[in-house]
Image (cartoon, rainbow, N blue to C red):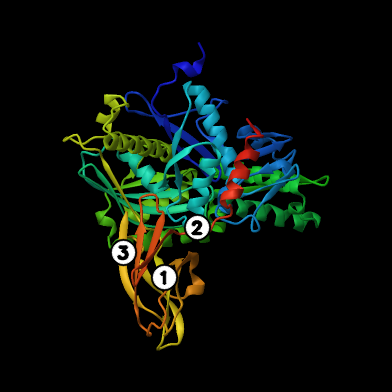
Amino acid sequence: MSENNHAPVHRKAVGIDLGTTFSAIAHIDQYGKPQIIPNAESERITPSVILFDGNQAIVGTLAKQNAVAEPEKIVDFVKREMGRSKAEFHREFNGKLYTAEELSAIIIKKLKNDAEKYLGERITDAVITVPAYFNDAERTATLHSGQLAGLNVLQIINEPTSAALAYGLDKLESDQTVFVFDLGGGTFDVTIMRIENHHIRMLASNGDHRLGGKDWDDIIVNWVAEEFDKVHGENPLLDLQSYQDLYNRALAAKVQLSTRPATTIVHNYNGKSIKLELTREDFEKRASHLLEKVKTICEIVMQEAALDWSKIDRVLLTGGMTRMPSVREMIRGLSNTEVAEDVSPDEAVSIGAAAQAILALLKEEDQLGERVLPVEVREQFSDRDGGLMKITNITTHTLGVVLWDDAKVEEYVFPMIKKMTAIPVEMKNSFGTAKANMKNAIVRVVEGESTVPGECTPLGLCDIELPPFLPKGSPVELTYRYDANQVLEVTVDAFGKQNRVSIARNVGLSEMELAEATADLSQINVM
């Protein structure tokens, strides 16, 4: 009998941490306990690096090891490009252009394939994590990546929420406020969570999706290159192979400086070499502006939550960069709070995502009146009264509408759903037409904190035809609905006419391109 005949009839859901430098996948076992699923190389985390070799896409450690030998075949740090159009970012291999969504889908496919082999069953569903400060386009690109990899994406969840869920799974009995500090290879998030009555609630979030470990690596890379140029009069960064080699040496030096006071870096280029000593103290001085940026964001999120540090019960560190002594010293000094050491910085996010995936399936069971998952699993995710634990996220960006200001004779942004609003949420407001005899009411939906339209990110348009001969100021009702998946639906009502649209998101792939990409990716052998 084939292996598939033994597969359980119920769906199998996993949690995926799609990281800038490393990715991980986890599931909840039959006893309701979270488990990391190792890859085919028996590693608990997989480098987010792809090596294209003909019709093969090799993902992980082997790809990373070959980065120096074949840098032109390598893709890394793709998470920083999520949400950008094909014109803004693509990589070409074997005559095919790959978007950020497609490249990320290849990484997810590697995780999925290896997990299926390890578990001996087909994986159907997933919750995929994103930085809390990802915008609409970046979130949708992540959703599309999961779909391209052949998964039903149950939800896109914020990484700090996921980490807090992993931390709080066995601490739901004690009420506490947790400061989640997530500094990874390419993104940075800080989020304040409240665990109370089996309910994990997001209070405030801030961050920078283009700040992470790579910026610390680049400091070492640029320093070595400058010293090489001073000695030999040549720039070793102009050669792709040399750059990749130097980057790997810089990364190794950074890791060593987390446990040693000093390290030595040797770099060879064009038959010439340089040997330099880098102390932890000197490295920390050179990177002090990055740490200051991190510190400022921490202080901003405390202000947004209207809390002082005495109200924080625990600091939860996630992301590989939190192993750096200077980062830990900064957050300890800032918070004067106990740092949780019982959650792995590399694994917390995927474990929390797996928990969220099971919660989603349990809710579906309740809606359908069916019981498929083991009783032990439900017990792990229920409160004393048998109700499922709750998770409440907030909006991390303001969702607004562009209006006309007669007094100032200019456009401005009116906030329909403000940042830090609990979701799901519905907001209604009524506006007057900007002038008489308008044929159409065109609603321009934007995302951002500014009142200046040009400083916000456009999300889409909603157009409705108006009756003839309307006077200026005729009422048009606008409704914004933002669901738990952070999908925005806009409804415009005017004089008995209604137009309702899920905002056409600002993403690089159209529906046709998604179908084409799915077909193309099926031809690639992901290893």
Q: Mark 2 points at which residue?
A: 505
Mark 1 neighbour density, 10 Å: few (under 14) some (14–19) many (20 or more): many
Mark closest to the chain's N terminus, 1 or 3: 1
Mark closest to the chain's N terminus, 2 or 1: 1
Q: Which of 204 and 439 is in front in this view?
A: 439
Mark closest to the chain's N terminus, 3 or 2: 3
Is residue 279 at least partly visible in the picture? no
Which residue sits furthest left?
Answer: 385
Q: Distance between the residues labelled 2 and 1?
A: 15 Å
Which amino acid type is shown beneath numbered disc 1? Val
Q: Mark 3 points at which residue?
A: 427
Q: Are marks 3 and 2 in contact (CB under 8 Å)?
A: no
Q: Is residue 67 above or below residue 288?
A: above
Q: On the rendered structure, is 383 left or right of 427?
A: left
Q: Where is residue 88 in the image (x, y as percent from the top left)?
A: 64, 58
Which amino acid type is shown beneath numbered disc 3? Met
Q: In this view, does 473 lie above or below 372?
A: below
Mark 2 neighbour density, 10 Å: few (under 14) some (14–19) many (20 or more): many
Q: Is mark 2 on a helix, strand or loop?
A: loop
Q: In this view, does 365 lie above or below 474?
A: above
Q: On the rendered structure, is 92 left or right of 285?
A: right
Q: Nearer the viewer, residue 486 or 469?
A: 469
Instruction: Identify the image quadrant of residue 96.
Output: top right
Which residue sits furthest bottom?
Answer: 407
User: Which disc number belongs to residue 401?
Assistant: 1
Q: Which of 503 and 64 is in front in this view?
A: 503
Q: Is mark 3 on a helix, strand or loop?
A: strand
Q: How far apart are marks 1 and 3 (CA)?
A: 12 Å
